[in-house]
Each structure stands twice: as structure tokens, then as C-alpha cells.
């Protein structure tokens, strides 16, 4: 199951295309070369980068995948993930990326 975070970080994808991609992934349809920045599957990591079509594999059928970012290419995904890690360190002085992103998600939900 894919969990899309309210404040989705994006790079290299227009807002209109972003909505189409989110809908297609939700319906378990293949998409082009789109990369997802997700919560890490290994606690030793900070973030995971997945090609969106990997979610069609049986391994992900019964797993929850929290998506924090969406990128139009692998290079964009790496740059976006690096920016997310650097932003976390600049704001908190630590590398707890997911903890910081969850705090940001909470603040975004409060203002709505």
C-alpha cells in the first residue's frame, strides 16, 4: 500500500503530471521513468529511492510504502533526496530525516 504524504517534495515533474502519476500508481498501473523518495526499508538508511514501477512487484503487495518525494529522473531523485537530508541537518542539527519530515507534515496539516 502506498501512503502519499500531504507535502510531497517534487523535482522535474509538473503539478499536473504529478497528479496523473499519483493516480496511476494508486491504480497499480505502470508509469514511465519516475522515481519515488520513500521512508527507508532499512533503519540504517536515511531514505530510499525507488523506481515507481518497482511497486508493481509482488514484494510490495502487502507492504506500506510512505512516499515523501517524486522525481522525473534518477538524477533529480538523488538531488532531491540530498536536499532533503541537507535541509534536515540545517534545521535540526541531526540526520533524523523521517522524524523531521513527519514534523513538517504535521505543521502542514495544522495550517489547512
Image: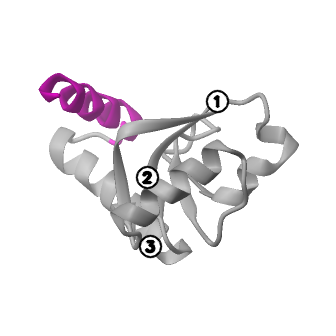
Question: How busy is the neighbourhood of tag 2: few (under 14 within 10 Å), some, or many (20 plus)?
Answer: many
Residue located at (49% from left, 76% from top): 75
Give the colour scheme of this rendering.
one colour
Residue most extreme to the left: 111
Residue located at (21% from left, 42% from top): 93
Q: Nearer the viewer, residue 48 or 57?
A: 57
Q: Which mark is residue 76?
A: 3
Q: Secondary structure at mark 2?
A: strand
Measured Cα–Cα span from mark 1 to mark 3: 24 Å
Going from N to C along the chain, the mark reached first, 1 or 3, is 1
Q: Residue 52 at what x, y percent from top left?
A: 64, 57
Which residue is labeled 2 in the image? 69
Instruction: Judge whether residue 99 is colored magenta.
Output: yes
Q: Nearer the viewer, residue 111 or 79?
A: 111
Residue located at (65% from left, 71% from top): 32
Q: Magenta residues?
A: 95-112
Measured Cα–Cα span from mark 3 to mark 2: 10 Å
Measured Cα–Cα span from mark 2 to mark 1: 15 Å
Q: Residue 108 at what x, y percent from top left?
A: 21, 32
Which residue is labeled 1 in the image? 64
Q: Secondary structure at mark 1?
A: loop
Residue located at (83% from left, 40% from top): 59
Tag 2–tag 1 contact (CB < 8 Å)? no
Q: Residue 36 at what x, y percent from top left?
A: 54, 55
Q: Is residue 49 above or below residue 47?
A: below
Q: Is residue 83 above or below residue 38?
A: below
Question: How busy is the neighbourhood of tag 1: few (under 14 within 10 Å), some, or many (20 plus)?
Answer: few
Screen quadrant of the N terminus: top right
Going from N to C along the chain, the mark reached first, 2 or 1, is 1
Amino acid at each position: 500500500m502506498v501512503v502519499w504524504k500531504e507535502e510531497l517534495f517534487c523535482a522535474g515533474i509538473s503539478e499536473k503530471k504529478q497528479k496523473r502519476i499519483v493516480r496511476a500508481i494508486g491504480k497499480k498501473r505502470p508509469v514511465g521513468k519516475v522515481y519515488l523518495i520513500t521512508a527507508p526499508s532499512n533503519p540504517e538508511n536515511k531514505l530510499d529511492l525507488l523506481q515507481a514501477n518497482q511497486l508493481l512487484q509482488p514484494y510490495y503487495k502487502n507492504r506500506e510504502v510512505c512516499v515523501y518525494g517524486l522525481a522525473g529522473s534518477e538524477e533529480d531523485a538523488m538531488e532531491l533526496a540530498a536536499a532533503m537530508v541537507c535541509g534536515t541537518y540545517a534545521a535540526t542539527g541531526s540526520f533524523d530525516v523521517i522524524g523531521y519530515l513527519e514534523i513538517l507534515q504535521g505543521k502542514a496539516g495544522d495550517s489547512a
